[in-house]
Image (spheres, rainbow, N blue to C red):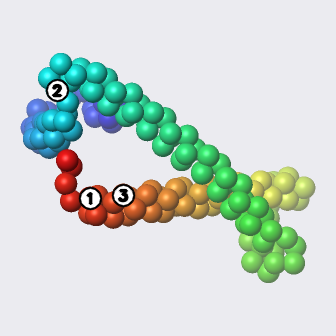
Amino acid sequence: MDDQLPPNVSMRWLICPMVLRGMLLFIALPVANLTFRVFAIEEYSHGYRFKNIVKQLMYSFSTATIIILEQHRVALHQTRLVETVNPYNPIFQNTYESLLNAFQGMGHSASEAKGLALVEISRSVAQQANFLSSLDGFYYVIGVALVASVIVAWQNRID
């Protein structure tokens, strides 16, 4: 976030985000108090260490899961999109001809224009596959959040 702010940013632009970040303590402290209430005071440090270990494991697991999901979905979407890129598809033919004419209009030779048109279509397919896989990742996160919210709603008490 630091590289998004200009070096001469005024203090009034920073006050609201800093206050909001500070208000997170009002949420975190009661939750931490409830989390460690079941431990005796001498076991608190062990419980806190255990919580940090579990937190780091969950960060690693969630990152690996999303990476694997995204790679799988990119391959799937790219395969499906490439199936439509063939000379028998009228949409492909129109797109290819438009790109071919545009590149020839820019002064490229016919053979260069053909290569550039195919590269542009290939880039577009890869871009669409990446977008669709990211969209699938968001749907996956929504599904996990819905399942977690049902579990939280079902669980009435922490004790």
44 vs 110, left or right, is: left
Identify the amino acid type marked 2: Ala
Identify the amino acid type marked 3: Ala
What residue occupies the far bottom of the structure in this picture? Answer: 90
Compare marks 2 and 1 and give the one earlier in the sequence: 2
Q: Position of residue 155 (x, y in %)?
A: 26, 58
Asked if 7 appears above or below 33 in the picture, the reply is above
Q: Position of residue 34 (x, y in %)?
A: 16, 40
Distance CA(mark 3)–CA(mark 2): 29 Å
Please report the residue visible at 43 percent of the width from the left and 38 percent of the height from the top: 58
Please state, as top left, top right, bottom left or bottom right, where the N terminus lies in the image. Answer: top left
Compare marks 1 and 3 and give the one earlier in the sequence: 3
- Find numbered disc 3 in the image and state the secondary structure of the residue it sits on: helix
Distance CA(mark 2)–CA(mark 1): 24 Å
Q: Position of residue 60 (x, y in %)?
A: 49, 35
Are circles 3 and 2 on residues that touch, CB within 8 Å?
no
- Find numbered disc 1 in the image and state the secondary structure of the residue it sits on: loop
Instruction: Report the residue marked by disc 1.
Output: 155
Asked if 138 appears above or below 53 in the picture, the reply is below
Query: Tag on residue 40?
Result: 2
Please report the residue visible at 54 percent of the width from the left and 47 percent of the height from the top: 66
Q: From where the camera sits, is residue 21 visible?
A: no
21 vs 89, left or right, is: left
Number of numbered discs: 3
Are circles 1 and 3 on residues that touch, CB within 8 Å?
no
Please report the residue visible at 87 percent of the width from the left and 78 percent of the height from the top: 88
Identify the amino acid type marked 1: Gln
- Find numbered disc 2 in the image and state the secondary structure of the residue it sits on: loop
The residue nearer to you, when weighing 68 against 3, is 68
Instruction: Report the residue marked by disc 3.
Output: 148
The residue nearer to you, when weighing 158 against 102, is 158
The residue nearer to you, when weighing 151 against 78, is 151
